[in-house]
Image: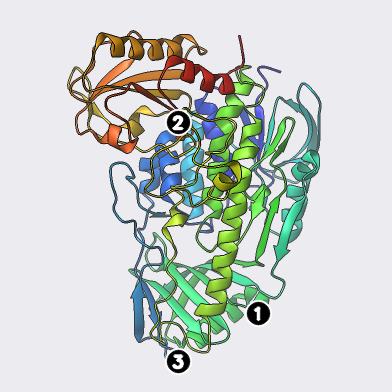
């Protein structure tokens, strides 16, 4: 089974991110999708800073940036009339400051561009999506998973294949084009692990979304009309001229009859009062009924589920695609070690332990936002018209403070920040502005200069195929502290499987002396030590996991070994 690829079901953002991470870890992957080709609709467009960091680590950030339209100013219009601007604002609250430690703001790019960027990177790694390919059944045993797969050719011919895979990732989620397919495609992987899909469906509500080319609207702005007591209509500009992603939604409002192109156009023009709008093209018209559901478990044995296969929820706040990609990035490095027979027995279990509470709290937050927006923004008067600011979404939606402090796969020599229940309660919103602990997102830092004068940042050092051990050498170096640094470097490199760990020694006053096997840098601005709240008088090691989270905060080789015993199996 060692040479058999890990099977990924579903070529949406979650499946593609998992495949790319595994490929970069040197693990063979096979990715299949029921659809006959990739979709070309906007769908999830908001890429939050934490996900952008993942794109940086995966090497696709610059490609994704080419499709970023930026966060347009929102304009709400007086009702009736539809042309007089009565409020201007930004949907997302802006971060307090873009800093070297938190270097990215929100991106806005249509989901089909995001998927194209990931597919392109996968193709360079020799991996291509197998379209018109779907699982019919799967059974697992102690050694792998047997999957019955149906492939459909261009003329409708079908072939059945029985494949063996060491592991399966179910990322098919909402890739289907119908409610029936959505139910059937996810049922296979959920059924295989015995998971339930708990939550609710807003039967009284519905939403219609379309990608449109419209003449008569300024592409610089995000346009919104609140129809009192009925619905909201939103038109967000996309990257092409005169192109907009248009949505219609409300509370106790179900616009399923608007799936007719003519009905859709007449409704938008009539309810906004903008009879002058000219719809030149409608590329996509889809209907969605709000569902807030998640599984009770993310894995069983050798089968794992990620993304929309594990959780569906309101698009409010733009958390769906981001949560899905973060699921996969959390899982893939652990799965890579397991595939190579390097993982500690409990490592794969940490995927569910870490992601389940985060997703549960994200689901609660997006459900709350959905209710707030559909019931308060659409009232007898629009909020803007009544003088109150429309809803601005909180900074927690940027997802930078998501953390795993309670995880069985992290270790902090300073102890924990509370009991497990207290830490679990802050899985999603985290500890903004607090000290960095094991389980937190690892911040970046610029100004790292080596002996040759070359400069880099921590985000350029971190990679998704290895742990990075940052060893902070004290400002006043002594023989004793030198021995402490040397012992930590030795434990990092000699006590772990080859190629899985990189040691980096950071000096506050100058480039540290050479340590065998380690890279050494001068932390010229001190931003690295400040970002991690390091005591400059004490030798400190911070272990950054392949997914960009702090795995350990320790002071000696013994603490480092304690962490790595949670990650790597004993020799």
- Is label 2 in contact with label 3 (beta carbons under 8 Å)? no
Position of residue 488 measured from the top left corner of the image (x, y, whole percent): 40, 14
Q: Please say whether residue 37 is visible from this viewpoint.
A: no
In the rendered view, tell whether residue 436 sits above or below residue 315: above
Side (left or right) of 215 relative to 152: left
**Which label was assigned to residue 252?**
1
> Which quadrant does the N terminus fall into?
top right
For numbered disc 3, what is the local secondary structure?
loop
In the rendered view, tell whether residue 561 sits above or below residue 430: above
**Which label was assigned to residue 486?**
none
For numbered disc 1, what is the local secondary structure?
loop
Position of residue 161 measured from the top left corner of the image (x, y, whole percent): 79, 31
For numbered disc 2, what is the local secondary structure?
loop
In the rendered view, tell whether residue 469 sits above or below residue 92: above
Task: Specify which label sits upstream in the sequence, 2 or 3.
Answer: 3
* Residue identified by numbered label 3: 80
* Residue identified by numbered label 2: 414
| Residue nearest the observer in this picture, 173 or 148 | 173
Side (left or right) of 332 relative to 491: right
Task: Specify which label sits upstream in the sequence, 2 or 1.
Answer: 1
How many marks the image carries: the answer is 3
* Comparing labels 2 and 1, the label whose residue is closer to the camera: 2
Position of residue 422 measured from the top left corner of the image (x, y, whole percent): 56, 47
Task: Using a 10 Å C-alpha cutoff, classify the residue at mark 3 as few (fewer than 14 neighbours), some (14 to 19) or many (20 or more).
Answer: some
In the rendered view, tell whether residue 109 sits above or below residue 419: below
Q: Residue at x 45, y 19 (%)?
A: 501
């Amino acid at each position: 089974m060692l040479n058999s690829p890990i099977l990924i079901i579903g070529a949406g953002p979650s499946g593609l991110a998992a495949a790319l991470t595994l490929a970069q870890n040197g693990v063979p992957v096979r990715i299949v999708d029921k659809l006959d080709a990739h979709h070309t609709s906007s769908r999830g467009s908001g890429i939050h800073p934490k996900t952008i960091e993942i794109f940086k680590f995966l090497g696709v950030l610059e490609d994704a940036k080419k499709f970023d339209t930026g966060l347009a100013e929102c304009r709400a219009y007086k009702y009736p009339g539809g042309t007089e601007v009565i409020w201007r604002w930004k949907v997302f609250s802006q971060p307090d400051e873009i800093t070297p430690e938190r270097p990215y703001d929100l991106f806005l790019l249509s989901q089909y561009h995001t998927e194209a960027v990931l597919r392109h990177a996968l193709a360079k790694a020799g991996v291509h999506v197998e379209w018109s390919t779907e699982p019919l059944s799967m059974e697992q045993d102690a050694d792998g998973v047997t999957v019955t797969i149906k492939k459909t050719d261009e003329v409708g011919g079908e072939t059945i294949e029985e494949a063996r895979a060491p592991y399966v990732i179910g990322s098919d989620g909402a890739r289907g084009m119908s409610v029936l397919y959505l139910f059937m495609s996810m049922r296979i992987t959920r059924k295989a692990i015995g998971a339930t899909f708990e939550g609710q469906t807003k039967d009284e509500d519905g939403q219609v979304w379309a990608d449109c080319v419209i003449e008569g609207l300024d592409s610089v702005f995000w346009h919104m009309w609140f129809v009192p007591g009925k619905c909201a209509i939103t038109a967000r500009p996309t990257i092409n001229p005169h192109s907009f992603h248009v949505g219609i939604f409300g509370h106790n409002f179900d616009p399923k009859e608007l799936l007719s192109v003519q009905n859709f156009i007449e409704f938008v023009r009539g309810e906004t009062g903008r009879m002058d709008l000219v719809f030149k093209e409608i590329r996509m018209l889809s209907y969605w009924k709000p569902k807030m559901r998640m599984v009770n478990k993310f894995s069983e044995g050798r089968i794992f589920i990620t993304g929309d296969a594990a959780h569906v929820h309101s698009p409010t706040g733009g958390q769906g695609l981001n949560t899905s990609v973060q699921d996969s990035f959390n899982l893939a490095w652990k799965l890579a070690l397991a595939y190579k027979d390097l993982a500690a027995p409990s490592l794969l279990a940490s995927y569910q332990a870490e992601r389940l509470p985060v997703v549960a709290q994200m689901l609660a937050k997006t459900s709350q936002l959905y209710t707030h927006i559909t019931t308060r923004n659409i009232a007898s008067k629009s909020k803007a018209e009544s003088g109150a600011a429309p809803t601005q979404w909180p900074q927690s939606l940027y997802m930078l403070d998501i953390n795993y402090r309670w995880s069985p796969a992290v270790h902090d020599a300073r102890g924990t920040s509370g009991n497990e229940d207290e830490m679990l309660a802050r899985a999603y919103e985290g500890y903004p502005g607090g000290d960095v602990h094991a389980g937190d997102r690892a911040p970046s830092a610029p100004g790292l200069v080596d002996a040759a004068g070359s400069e880099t940042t921590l985000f350029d050092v971190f990679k998704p195929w290895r742990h990075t051990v940052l060893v902070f050498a004290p400002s006043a170096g002594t023989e004793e502290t030198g021995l402490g640094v040397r012992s930590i470097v030795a434990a990092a490199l000699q006590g772990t499987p080859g190629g899985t760990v990189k040691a980096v020694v950071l000096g506050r006053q100058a480039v540290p002396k050479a340590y065998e096997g380690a890279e050494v840098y001068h932390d010229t601005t001190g931003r690295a030590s400040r970002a991690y709240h390091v005591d400059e008088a004490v030798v400190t090691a911070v272990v950054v996991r392949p997914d960009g989270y702090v795995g350990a905060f320790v002071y000696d080789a013994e603490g480092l070994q304690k962490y790595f015993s949670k990650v790597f199996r004993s020799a």
